[in-house]
Amino acid sequence: MSKAEILVIDDEAHIRKLLEIALESNGYKVWQAASGRDGVILAANHPPDLVILDLGLPDKSGHEVLKELRTWYAKPVIILSVQNLEEDIINALDHGATDYLTKPFRPGELMARIRSLLRRDSEPSNGAQRKFGNIHIDFIARLVKKNDEQVKLTSTEYQLLILFAKNEGNVLTHHYILKEIWGPSYLEETQYLRVFVGQLRKKIEEDPHNPQHIITESGVGYRFV
Amino acid sequence: MNVLSDIKLNKLSLPGQLVISLTSVAAVSCLCFIISDFIGGYKTVAFILLMVVSILAMVFDILPVLITSFLTALIWNYFFIPPILTFNIRNTEDLLFLFMYLIIASVNAALTYKIRKAEKKASIREEKQHTIKLYNTLLNSLSHELRTPLATIVGGLDTLKEQKNLTEKQKSELFATLDAASMRLNRQVENLLNMNRLESGLLRLKLDWCDMNELVFGMVKKYFSTQGREIVINTSEGLPFFRLDQGLVETALLNIIHNAVQYTPEHSKIIVSLEQSGNRCIIRIEDHGKGFPEHEVNSVFEKFYRLPGAGTGGTGLGLSIAKGCIEAHNGSIVLENKKNGGAVFTLIIPAQTSFINHMKNE
């Protein structure tokens, strides 16, 4: 298997260097762009397997870069942002970003995210069945098993779980999930979402207070792993 | 000391001040007109009117007071100086009295106004000095609190680069120190940003339904799971959702728990309890440290306040940020010492509740 190629778009030379070392030592080939313009051109010339995009670029905002990329690019885009800018992160996720990390971030954490996103992309989920740790989903039979025991889910709980499973590893914003499951007129009804996430956790997590599958991204949304 | 300028009446508009002045003068004049025979005649009335003008001068602006003093002179002349109900004056003595009355009333008004202005200026200057003092405290505290972790990082990196014969144990200890120092640096910067956000006055609450269990368990796991400190979370399963700003409540909790972790013995427990009381979310954070000196209990939430003898590692911002976050919800934080040692922070946050999470679905 050839090396996976990763494009880093960030204007900070220090961050680029850090990412270059971390990524190369993990066996990836790294492309670098210091501006949004260069990033878009580079991506078009050498379509990478994954893009790491800083939101605070000098020439054009990361949001614009993301929008341009998403007109043709379907592979994962991980957003880097500074802390305390939840609106920014939510905005990027709602416009096609796959995942995000806030600076300062730990390269180890980033590598783990990249690994899981690339692995997901390399083994297309063709099957009617998927396994997530101790959770087993049979899409045709609409069956969910935890530790080989069947879990009884209501129809909404099942829909929610399927939405999570189809987007394994992606951060899904509250708005996105509400729109997909309940429809566009329920965008602000986060309490429904919390109720069903709570119930789903009670059924599929070993310890609902310390979830291993449905991870809360505080103020942003959920991630399923 | 600024009693005079503290009186709220001078916030009134000029017409408002004028109306109040004239009404009080009219009322007092009427009263005097009725009882003037019993109080020793028109000369006493002059003193009473002068007194009214003086009182008005203490609270109102100069213009309405000057108008009033001129008017009282006319009133005195018309209603009280014989022959009454005319502006005529019979003898030079009364004319002189009227003239002096006008001068005394005006000078009185002008002087009182001047004194009040000077007082206001002094209080502004005092406030400025207080701000400068706070600013200096901040700079001192900052340069120390930011430089200490920076020094650790610079020194640690240099050691790792230069010392070729470090043992694996020494290396891993150095890495742990570097890690802690950078986290501390990050926390300080975040605290400063939070303080700025709270004080800018631009803070808008982002209210959303919140599962408090999720918030507290998640926060403790995210920030304290690696610190080897036992944090017990007591929750009641019947807790409703609360509508509040999760980010702010999380920041408040983080700062209080962090404070407890830092200043209580390494192996002592910290207990976080969640409760609902009417339309209020109540969070209690209990530690088993020494507690706070009783006379310091009210000061610990002040900006840059640090307990005398507190070790390094804080800016004195954490608890005041926590307070700011909760007060932004119109809530409050109460700090108490327990009888058998340890401190309890009680966060009381008024919020809309929803029991939708305890209803049977579908």
Image (spheres, coloured by chain):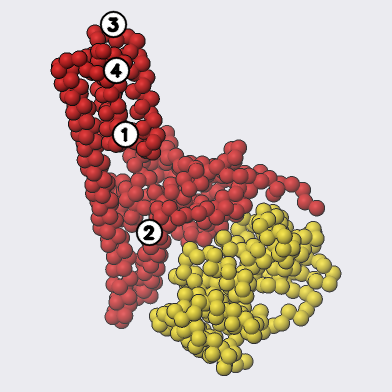
Task: Select label 4 or label 2 by which is in front.
Answer: 4
Q: Which chain is mark 3 on?
A: B
- Of labels 3 and 2, earlier in sequence is 3
Q: From the image, tell me which residue sits under label 2.
A: B192
- Of labels 2 and 1, earlier in sequence is 1
CA gap between label 1 and label 3 equals: 31 Å
| In-image side of A185 versus A79 (left or right) | right
Q: Residue at x 69, y 49 (%)?
A: B357
Mark 1 packing: few (<14 Cα in 10 Å), some, or many (20+)? many
Q: Is residue B169 above or below residue B1?
A: below
- Residues at discs 3 and 4 both on one chain: yes
- Of labels 1 and 4, earlier in sequence is 1
Mark 4 packing: few (<14 Cα in 10 Å), some, or many (20+)? few
Q: From the image, tell me which residue sits under label 3.
A: B38
Q: Nearer the viewer, residue B342 or A190?
A: A190
Disc 3 and disc 4 in contact, CB within 8 angstroms? no
Q: Position of residue A220 (x, y in %)?
A: 58, 63
Disc 3 and disc 2 in contact, CB within 8 angstroms? no
Report the chain shown in yellow. A
